[in-house]
Image (spheres, rainbow, N blue to C red):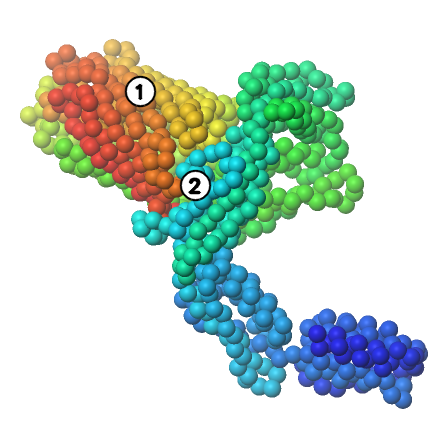
Amino acid sequence: MKKYIVAFLFFINTYSYSEIVNKIEVAGNERVSKETIMVYGDISLKSDYTSEDLNNILKKLYGTNFFDDIKLSINNNVLKIVVKEYPIINSVKVEGEPKNERIEKLLEVISSKKNGPFIKNILREDVETIKKLYLSLGYNFSKIDSRIEEITKNRINLFFFIDKGEKTQISKIYFIGNKKVRDRRLRDIIVSQEYKFWKFITKTIYLNSRNIELDKRLLKNYYKSIGYYDVQVLSSNAEIDSENSTILTYNIDAGTRYRIKKISTNVDPAIDKSNFVSLNKQFEKIVGKYYSPFTIKKLLDEVDLLISSKDIQFVEHSVNEIIEGKNIEVKINIFEGEKQLVEKINVKGNTVTNESVIRAELLLDEGDPFNLLKLKQSMAKLKARKIFSEVTNEVLPGSSKDTKIINVAVKEQPTGEISAGAGVGTNGGSFAFNVKENNWLGRGLKVSTFLEADQDTIKGSLSVTDPNYNYSGNSLGWFVSSTQNDKPDSGYENSLMSTGINTAFEQYKDVHLNAGIAINHDDMQVQDTASASLKKQAGTFTDISLDYGIGIDKRDKVYMPTSGYVSSFTQTIPLYADSPYLRNNYRFSKYNAFGEDVIGSFKLFLSSINGLQGEDVRLSKRARIPRNRIRGFKPGKIGPRDGTDYIGGNYVAAVNFETSLPNLLPENSKTDVGLFLDLANIWGVDYSSSLDDSNTIRSSVGVATSWLSPIGPLSFILAQDIAKADTDQTQSFTFNLGTSF
């Protein structure tokens, strides 16, 4: 305010001036040179300085934030400028905040900077900015003070003193108005949570203004997803009833619930309508259901896929939604867009990842026709690499009206993962450890090591995979594995070494092909006390095998899917083998949503292995039930036995039924609980009829819990066998812990 008063008074006193200036004098400046002042003030010798000219000089010089006070005068054709410079901030220090990362954030958001000018008005704004920062973190009663320490006449140290107080806990969350949905369900939707003693480590139990805004968006999205097209979250209110407790209330007007009455396409005459006839089947499935913007989004994705598969250039689409009573008519408009080319693509934000890794995932290149769909698909591919926490793009006009410039920005994240698991059963325990790196050397390479051990077996493996080898869109991987079985009580020990390469690629939309070649070396030694059938397995054997397969993935999402299915078939055939065999594996999983928060799944696993040319299947190659297909049983300790040793079988079949439990842990969105029923069998012994082939259908029931803990994802399985063979070994409890680095 001071500077504007000075400018106003100066204007009053000089409004009639129009004077020739032959000389310019500057006084009071210590750091800022006369030349700098003249440049920033646009000052020069001229014949007719008016009051307006002088006021413009004042505005420009005050706008530099160099000066606390400025005085101008003209006398005897001399323009005299007297300034008072702002002090310089020598250092900015924060006291009362123990976390260095929060101090760094605080210093980043304030305007007062080291080596910058000290301005009292800006200091007051900085104090308010710091208060808002702590308010967003749940500290609603923080106290922020500041102090300056004068070092020299024109240089100071700036101090901020933080008394953040206690975080404000959310004691209750209420929903009022025409809400149409149970409060319990709405609490599961939002991120804010009511305080419970077992949630002491959860940040969302504290009042946070950013979380409240996120809650409102989540509520609107949820209501729209179940048909409430014009829902409004009218208000939110936080009523603080004590210094660390508050009541949070959301006022909701759900409005009318709409159904989809009709869906149609309006195709531009310049575009062949027959390209989009197949959409009619999709329309039939949706008409009559409650409106959801996510459903419409899936339809537009189908439109995009048709455009892409038929390579139609410069085509765009839009949606018109017409409300009639309680129904909505959806019109999808397909029309020609602007014919533009990609002039340049800029990549930024990558500090570890090579730029070539990012560009290799882009479906657009410089000089290509600009295609918004391909740009969206490129962003999705970059996100799928799991090496970036954020992937964004910006499209700008190019150097001409028919070109575009694309800016791609990424934010790197920790790409390492550590997981460990253990199980406890009737015959001891087991342990597994896994380390992964998804961006090795910044080249996007995936490196994984695995170790598993129990009382008589140690397994280890190392694999390296390039998900986009030579920028071809195909993956290429190499692996090596080793298994050591030491079973002196069972009469044998063996060492199995394997190495090989594999590749995979997407042939069509959601259809993937894979192939690989492996070299296996098996060295088995038996004791004199071993059975006759086991002694036949002794020796050293080498084989080379070809693995290939096909997979179809129609799930809505890879992690925790709610609909769709995934199916795959793989086969292993011998290229060279001392004991040739043929292996077949088939996997199928189907997911369905029942109601608002219950997800059911059905999974099927089939496997067979048979010797060729009259040969028996070797012990190391025989089929076994995967650990996740029959919970409650110890992996590998099921099925045919030779004496006390489990030798595997020729055939495996497993069926799994699982369903989530709704709202078992209220308002805790980071915990999922489900019930399961597993059925499995392993049978077939081809090399001796004297062995124990306990052809019995095994079954178990149990509870599976997943918790996103502060130290990483943690899963527990508690299982009880229902039916088993007398020789089977059970394992009632397992857990797995994973984290990132």
Q: Residue at x 53, y 81 (%)?
A: 149
Please identify, in this view, whether the residue under mark 2 or under mark 1 is nearer the observer. Answer: 2
Does 217 appear above or below 242?
above
Q: Nearer the viewer, residue 714 or 378?
A: 714
Amino acid at the residue labelled 2: Arg
Q: Which residue was labeled with disc 1?
A: 655
Q: Residue at x 39, y 28 (%)?
A: 598
Q: How many neighbours does mark 2 have within 10 angstroms: few (below 14), some (14-19), or many (20 or more)? A: many
Residue 539 located left or right of residue 233: left
> Could one spot residue 541 in this view of the protein?
no
Q: How many neighbours does mark 1 have within 10 angstroms: few (below 14), some (14-19), or many (20 or more)? A: some
Q: How many marks?
A: 2
Q: Nearer the viewer, residue 678 or 619?
A: 678
Q: Which residue was labeled with disc 2?
A: 187
* Residue situated furthest front in the rendering: 177
Question: Residue 403: where, in percent of width, then height?
Answer: 74, 40
Find residue 378 and report its image quarter. top right
Find residue 471 and report its image quarter. top right
Residue 56 located left or right of residue 109: right
Question: Residue 424: where, in percent of width, then height?
Answer: 19, 37
Residue 608 located left or right of residue 9: left
Amino acid at the residue labelled 1: Val
Q: Residue at x 32, y 18 (%)?
A: 606
For residue 640, the mark is: none
Find residue 86 and report its image quarter. bottom right
